[in-house]
Image: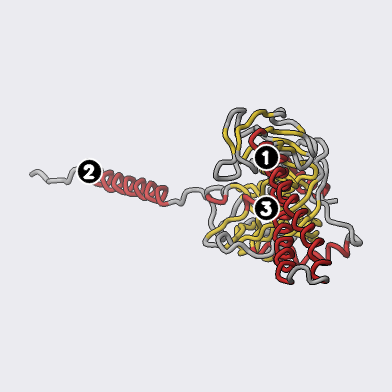
């Protein structure tokens, strides 16, 4: 009789199967846990910061304009005639009374001679009528001639006298016209190029422009300022005079190549009214120009110190963001998080910007890397290199030195 016994191998296989499944699930669970772990946090972005600078700052006013001669005299032909001679070197310095042009004088000499002859005729007529009057007076007293004849003689004398005066005026005019044939410089100055050559007919129909003479010492500089700038300037005029004990404020003239004219100038005149077309007011300065370096028509910039801000706060211009006329600055706090502050900006000094409101002297402002951060996010601040900061300080120092 056989007894059926369950195979122990089968039981062993089932146990191993259960154990293997458990191990697989455990491994999968471990792998699942490993996949769900959060990645390590990224390092805060790096930004370049610089501290707010606080110092006394000279605020300069700058105006762009153009030079002109203190006298720019147009030399024109005042009589009609053919030009005989051009008697100067173009672009040279000429003296008052120096001959510049000669116009053919012969027609005017003939006119003068004719006027003088007519004057002699009129004077002879006046002499005759005067003799008649002198002869008739005693005869009328003796009733040898009538009163009517004396009256006629007196009228003829008056007419002859008027003719003499008229001919004298013609002679004077002829002499003046003859004098205009020699064209001289009315001032000392620099003469320009000639607009006509010898042999040209000048003065027909209008006063032909021949050349221009400009007085260069002193030289004038004219610039336009806005109404707001004018009001700001006019309110400071009395204070500036008191600060300088009545001495004029020195004006520096920066030329086109960036150099400063060695002779400071002064305010000359302010135009009477604002130009309605441009909304600007013309202001004129006067500068000594002994060497004649500056010529009329040159462009430049007039600069002078308008005021000194005590303890002003300054930041680099690149740290200031502008959006729809609103200005803001990114600031890194003591906890290295970024915040954005709205600020009120003042004048620019070199490559710095005066901040009138919105910042504290202890703030650190972001100058690079702002596009990588948002308000409230932590950052890794890195101080700006000394070269980047010192450039602005140097520009400010130069401005302060020029204003002294």
**Nearer to me, 250 or 114:** 114
Q: Few, some or many C-alpha atoms within 10 Å of disc 1 (few <14, some 14-19, many ≥20)?
A: some
Report the residue at 75% width, 54% height from top: 128
> Could you tell me if the residues under marks 1 and 2 are in contact, i.e. CB atoms within 8 Å?
no
Element on which disc 3 rests: strand
Nearest to viewer (mark 2 / mark 3): 3
Q: Nearer the viewer, residue 97 or 175?
A: 175
Circle 3 packing at 10 Å, graded few (<14), some (14-19), many (20+), is many
Q: Position of residue 109 (x, y in %)?
A: 69, 36
Label located before the other in sequence (2 or 3): 2
Residue at the spot of label 2: 8
The one nearer the camera, 184 or 330, is 184
Q: Residue at x 57, y 45 (%)?
A: 206
Residue 354 visible in image: no
Q: Nearer the viewer, residue 232 or 70?
A: 70
* Mark carried by residue 223: 3
Coloured how? secondary structure
Quadrant of the drawing holding the N terminus? top left
């Amino acid at each position: 009789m056989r007894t059926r016994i369950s195979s122990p191998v089968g039981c062993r296989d089932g146990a191993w199967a259960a154990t293997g499944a458990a191990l697989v699930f455990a491994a999968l669970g471990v792998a699942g846990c490993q996949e769900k772990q959060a990645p390590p946090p990224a390092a805060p972005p790096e930004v370049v910061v610089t501290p707010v600078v606080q110092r006394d700052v000279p605020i300069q006013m700058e105006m762009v304009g153009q030079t002109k001669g203190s006298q720019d005299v147009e030399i024109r032909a005042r009589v009609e005639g053919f030009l005989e001679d051009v008697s100067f070197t173009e672009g040279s310095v000429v003296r008052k009374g120096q001959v510049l042009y000669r116009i053919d004088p012969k027609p005017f000499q003939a006119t003068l001679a004719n006027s003088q002859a007519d004057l002699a005729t009129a004077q002879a007529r006046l002499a005759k009528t005067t003799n008649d009057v002198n002869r008739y007076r005693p005869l009328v007293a003796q009733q040898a001639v009538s009163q009517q004849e004396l009256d006629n003689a007196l009228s003829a004398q008056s007419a002859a006298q008027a003719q003499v005066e008229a001919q004298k005026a013609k002679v004077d005019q002829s002499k003046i016209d003859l004098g205009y044939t020699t064209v001289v410089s009315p001032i000392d100055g620099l003469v320009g190029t000639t607009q006509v050559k010898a042999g040209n007919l000048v003065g027909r129909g209008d006063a032909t422009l021949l050349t221009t003479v400009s007085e260069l010492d002193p030289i004038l500089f004219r610039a336009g300022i806005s109404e707001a700038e004018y009001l700001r300037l006019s309110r400071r005029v009395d204070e500036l005079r008191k600060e300088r004990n009545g001495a004029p404020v020195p004006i520096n003239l920066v030329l086109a190549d960036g150099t400063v004219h060695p002779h400071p100038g002064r305010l000359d005149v302010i135009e009477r009214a604002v130009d309605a077309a441009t909304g600007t007011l013309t202001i004129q300065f006067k500068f000594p120009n002994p060497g004649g370096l500056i010529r009329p028509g040159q462009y430049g910039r007039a600069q002078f110190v308008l005021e000194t801000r005590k303890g002003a706060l300054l930041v680099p211009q690149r740290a200031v963001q502008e959006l729809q006329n609103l200005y803001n600055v990114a600031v890194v706090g003591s906890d290295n998080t970024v915040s954005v502050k709205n600020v009120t900006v003042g004048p620019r000094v070199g490559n710095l910007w005066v901040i009138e409101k919105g910042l504290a002297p202890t703030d650190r402002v972001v100058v690079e890397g702002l596009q990588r951060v948002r308000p409230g996010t932590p950052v890794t601040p890195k101080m700006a290199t000394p070269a980047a900061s010192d450039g602005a300080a140097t520009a400010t120092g130069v401005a302060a030195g020029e204003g002294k």
